Image (spheres, grey):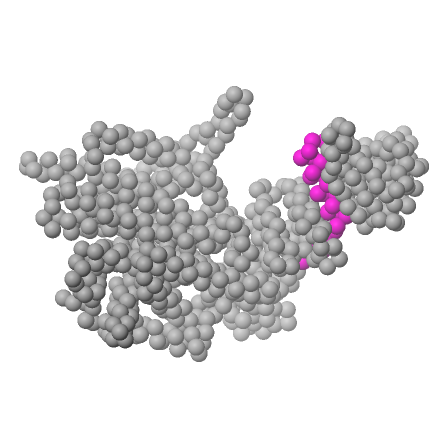
Amino acid sequence: MNLMKYKKIFFLISAFFLIPGLISLVFFGLRPSIDFKGGSLLEIKFIEEEKTQDYQETILKDDLEEIFSIDTVQETGQDSLILRGQEITNEEKEIVLDLIREKFGELELLRFESVGPILGQELLKKTITAIFLVAAVIVIYIWQQFHDLKYGVSAVLAMFHDSLILLGIFSLLGHFKGVEVDVLFVTAILTTLSFSIHDTVVVYNRIRELKKKHRHLSLTEIANAAVWKTLGRSINDSITIIIMLLSLVLLGGESVRYFSLALLIGAITGTYSSSFIAVPILLVWEELANRKS
Amino acid sequence: MNKKSNTKSLLWLLILTVIAGYIAFPKRLTIDTNFFSKKIQFEINKQAIDFYFWGKHIYKDFELKKGLDIQGGMQVVLRAKMDEIALEDRETALESAREIISRRVDLYGISEPTIQAARLEDDYRLIVELPGVEDPQQALELVGRTAELEFRLERELSEEELAEATQSANFLDLYFVSTGLTGQQLKKAQLQFDQQTAKPQIILEFNDEGRDLFAEITKNNIDKILAIFIDAYPVVTPSISSAILDGRAVMTGDFTVEEAKNLAIQLNAGALPVNIEVLEQKNIGASLGDESVQKSINAGLIGLSLVILFMILYYGWVGVISSIALLIYAILTIALYKIIGVVLTLPGIAGLILTIGMAVDANILIFERMKEEQRAGRSYAESIELGFGRAWDTVKDANLASIVSALVLINPLNFSFLNTSGLIKGFGVTFLLGSLLSMFTGVTVTRILVRQLVPIIKAKEFKS
C-alpha cells in the first residue's frame, strides 16, 4: 500500500490536534508558574482531619487578603492544598500560616517557594535560547549527514509540530484544569525535541540507504518503503517508552506527574510526526521543487 | 567473529556486571512481604569499602546522593549588591561573601551545603543549597547577614577577671576589646610572597582614617595581640611587632599558601562587605520527597516488568536476551550514578525511568532488521550479523539528538544564557548517561549475548 498517497489525511489528523491547542494558546495562553512570573507558593497539609473538609476557597482568600493575595487554591491530595499568590517574605509567611491555623487547625508546611520577578524573566529567555540552540544544532547535523538542507528543515518542522501540540494541550489543561507551566515543563519540551528527531533520523537513514540501492525509484516510492520498513520499530520502540511513562503518570509521585504527562505526549507525537509529518513534508517540498524546474 | 574471543567478552561482561551489581546494591535492603500467604522477612547488609592502602584511607559506601527536593531543605538565590564596590573588586567581594557564608553554614552544622557563585551580566549572585534545614527563617539570617570585621586588642586581665573570664561563655569578649578599627577602614587584603623566604604573607591596606587609627594602636601596643574578628569570632591573632604608620601592614606567620589564601578571602569579606538580597527561596519538607520517591520507584519497577514482558512476548528468545541486557543496563546505570556521585532528584528519577523505556530501542531496531534480513532469505547467523552491522549507524545518529538535548539541559560549561537550575540538570544528567549507556548495552552487550546464546538455543530447537 502506498502510504504517502494519504499525505493530506496525515496533515488533517495533525491539524485536528493542533488547531484546538493553537486557538487555546492564542486566547488563553499558558498558565505560567511562579518560576516564570514570580510570586509565592505554599503547600500545606491539614493535620486535624475533621477540619479538613471545612476550608472554603473564598474564606481562605478573604481572610488572608491583607497580607497574601492569593491567585489560586489547588487541592493536591485529600488533606493538602497549594496556595499561590504574590511574593511574600518569610515573616509574612509565618503570619499567613498562623491565620490559617486559627481557622482550620494544626497544619504542616510541606513546601514554601518564593521567586522574585527578575528570575522569572530570565528563565523565559533561557528557555527560548535553549530551544533554538537545540533546533539549530539538529538542522546543521542532519543537513551535514544527508547533504541536503530539505532533510534538516523538514525534521525541524516536524519537531516544532510536536512542540506546538504539546504547548496547545498544556494551554487547554491550564485553562480547564489549572495546570501550570514550570521549569520541568521546559525540560520536557527540550527532551521531546530529541524524541521527535530520534525517530525522524531512523526513517531518513532508511531513505538514504534505499536511495543508494534503487536509483531508478522515485522519492515517493522510496519514502513509502522506508516508512513501511521502519514503522514496526517505531511503534514498538514507542510502546516501551509509553509503558514506562504511563506507569509514571499513573503511579508516580504528584510532583512529576505533569512532567511525565508532557513527556508522554511528546513521545506519542514524536513517533507520529516522524513517519507522517517529516516524510510527507519532504515529499511536498520535492514536488514543489520539481514543479518549478 | 570467532567464538573464543566472544566467550572472553562474555566473561568480561559478567565480571563488570557483578562489580556494578555490588556497587548498585543498596546498603541495607529489608524484605518484608507476603508471598503466597507465606511471610518472608529478612535483611541484607552491605559492607562499605573501608581499608588502608599505603597509609591512605580508602572509604566508599556507594550511597546515592539525594537532591534537595528529595531529602528536603532550602535553596536560596541571593543577590550581592555591588553598587558601592569598585568594578575591579567585585569578583573578590563575591568570592569573599561566598567564603563567609560557607563558614557560617559549616559552624551552624549543616552537612553538605553547596554555595555557588554565579554572575549574570551585572548581577552577582550566590546560589545556596542547605539540605535538611528546618527553620528557613534562621537559615536566611545566617546567609543574609553582612560580614562584620573588627580589630580587637588583647587586654590585661586582673586575676579575678581572669578567673571569671575562663568560666564565662563570653571569654572572648572579655579578653579582647574593640579598637574602633573595623572592616570599613580596611581597604583590601592581599596574598603575597616574602621576597627572601618565599613564604606566603598577607598585606593589609587601610584607608586614611584607618591608617591613623592603626598607627595609633600599633604605636602604643607593641608585642600585644591584635586579633581580627569576623562575625564576632577570631580568624587570626597576630601580634604587633612594630609601629606601622603608613597604613600598610604585613602579616606573617606559619601559614600554608592555602591557609593564607583563605584568610585573605575572609578578610576581604570584611573589607568589601556586600549587602545581600534574597531573590528566590524554596523550602521543601522532607515528607514530600520520600513519598514521591517511593511512588516513582514502584512505577519504574512496574514499567520495567511490563517492558520485559512485552519484549519476550513479541520477540521470543531474542526478547529474553534483550531483557537481560536491559537489566544489565539498569544495574550499570545505578552503579555509575553512585560512582560519579549523581545527585538524585525527582526529575532525575523520572529521567532514569524514561531511559529504561528508551534503552531497548537499539534492540528493537536491530531485531526488526534481523527479521527483515531473514525474510529476504538470509540464514539466521547471517541476519544477526547484518542486523547489528546496519543498525549501528542509525543508533548512533538517533542518539546524537538525545545527547545534544541533554547537554543543553545540563549546561556543563555553566553558560549564563542557559539554565543553571539543579532540577533541570538532575534530569539532564540521567538522560545523558542513559543515552550513552543504552548504546553500550543495546548494541555491544546484546551482541555478546546473542552470539553466545543463540547458537545454543537454535541447536536445541533443531534437535527436538
Q: Nearer the viewer, residue A54 or A40?
A: A40
Q: Nearer the viewer, residue B451 or B306?
A: B451
- Taking the view exactly as shown, the residue that stands out farthest to the top is B54
List x then y, in percent, for residue B363: 25, 47
- Residue B257 on the magenta span: yes
List x then y, in percent, for residue A286: 26, 69
Please give the name of the residue rendered at 37% of the width and 35% of the height, measured from the top-left corner: B20
Q: Residue A234: in sight, yes or no?
A: no
Q: Does residue B268 lie above or below A133 as drawn?
A: above
Q: Which residues are magenta?
A: B255-278
Q: Residue B27: in sight, yes or no?
A: yes
Q: Main secondary structure of the magenta part?
A: helix
- Residue B74 on the magenta span: no
List x then y, in percent, for residue A248: 36, 55
Q: Is residue B287 left or right of residue B457?
A: right
Q: Is residue B80 left or right of residue A122?
A: right
Please give the name of the residue rendered at 41% of the width and 58% of the height, measured from the top-left corner: A137
List x then y, in percent, for residue B73: 56, 50
Find residue A225 and report its image quarter: bottom left
Quarter holding the N terminus of chain B is top left
Q: Nearer the viewer, residue B207 or B104?
A: B207
Q: Does residue B311 lie above or below A96 as drawn?
A: above
Quarter holding the C terminus of chain B is top left
- Taking the view exactly as shown, the residue that stands out farthest to the left is B464
